[in-house]
Amino acid sequence: MGSGYWVLGTGTRTKFFKDSVPNHQSPITSPQSPVPNHQSPITSPQSPAPRKLSNCYKRMTIVLIEIL
């Protein structure tokens, strides 16, 4: 989840923390029950996403190097 927050960015991450923390504090049991269910699908799409991004970045760097 940490990497996911970093991908979203610092601004959105802080908003997530501010919005989610109060919501999780009052009804801890109800939000946490879906959270694990959401975490498993989130991790599976996120695992290939960084690979695709890294490949795109590698291609972009190669193109930039060729241009230079």
Image (cartoon, grey):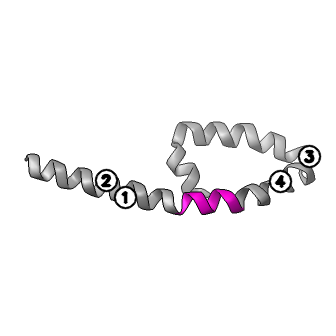
- Inspect the image, locate mark 4, and give the three-letter code of the amino acid beneath it: Pro
Residue bounds of the magenta highlight: 40-47
Secondary structure of the magenta portion, mostly?
helix
Q: Amino acid at mark 2?
A: Tyr
For disc 4, the marked residue is: 34
3D distance between C-alphas at marks 3 and 4? 12 Å
Secondary structure beneath dot 1 equals helix
Which residue position holds label 1? 54
Foreground: 22 or 49? 49
**Where is residue 30 shown, x and y percent of the image?**
91, 50
Amino acid bearing label 3: Pro
Asked if the residues shown at circle 4 and circle 1 are in contact, with their CB atoms under 8 angstroms apart, the answer is no
**Does the magenta-highlighted stretch encompass residue 43?**
yes
Residue on which disc 3 sits: 27
- CA neighbours of label 2 inside 10 A, class few (<14), some (14 to 19), many (20+): few
Q: Is disc 1 in contact with disc 2, using a CB cutoff of under 8 Å?
A: yes
Image mark for residue 57? 2
Image side of residue 29 versus residue 14, left or right: right
Q: Residue at x 78, y 59 (%)?
A: 37
- The spot of residue 54 in percent (x, y) is 37, 58
